[in-house]
Amino acid sequence: MSNETIIYGAFCFPCLYGQNQAKLKDLQGSSNSYCYPGCFTYLFFMTYGSLLGFSIGSCIHASPAFASILGDICSRASVGVYAGQTRKRIRQITNIPQNEHCDDCAIHMFCSPCAICEESIALEHYEKHGESYGPVPTAPPEEMIMEKN
């Protein structure tokens, strides 16, 4: 796991999403893949959803607080639908474990930065090792016994 990826994903997750899309296109055989289209499209869906929610709030003459909540819900939903599709394509290549309780859309809707970081780590692992990403096997530490010589 890369600390740089997690920090980058926490502070600039649309940019990391664009990089993930470019890596995915490279792995699928596309040449000249850039991160800008994915980044700007992600930002567009964030902004469009927010504006849609504010518009709905003003049409029903809701309070500014309620209109803000609607904007956030619509923004998250639009990003979830868009980014969830990319996550499904990444899963086909890298074998990211699928959550049995949440769809990809819901994962991006409720914690998109976390999902983007997981996708990036899986893509990095696949690029370096050429194998699918999966759970890392762990074992408890061995018990240490102090003996007198």
Image: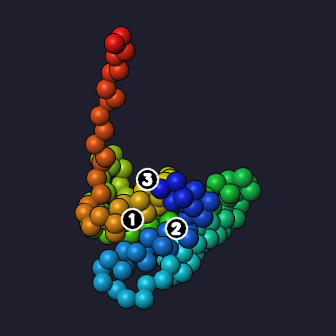
Residue at left offset 55%, top offset 68%: 14
Coloring basis for residues: rainbow
- Cα distance, mark 1 to mark 3? 9 Å
The quarter holding residue 31 reads bottom left
* Depicted 115 relative to depicted 139: above or below: below
Provide residue 112's location: percent of width, then percent of height. Answer: 50, 58
Side of 16 relative to 11 (left or right): left
Q: Are marks 2 and 3 in contact (CB under 8 Å)?
A: no
- Cα distance, mark 2 to mark 3? 15 Å
Query: Which residue is at the far right?
Result: 64
Residue at left offset 34%, top offset 66%: 128
Instruction: Give the SS element for disc 2.
Output: helix
- What residue would you read off at disc 2? 16
Residue at left offset 51%, top offset 60%: 5
Side of 147 relative to 12 (left or right): left
In the rendered structure, which disc, 2 or 3, sits on the residue that comes first in sequence?
Answer: 3
Amino acid type at circle 3 is Met
Instruction: Give the SS element for disc 3.
Output: loop
Amino acid type at circle 1 is Glu
- Cα distance, mark 2 to mark 1? 12 Å
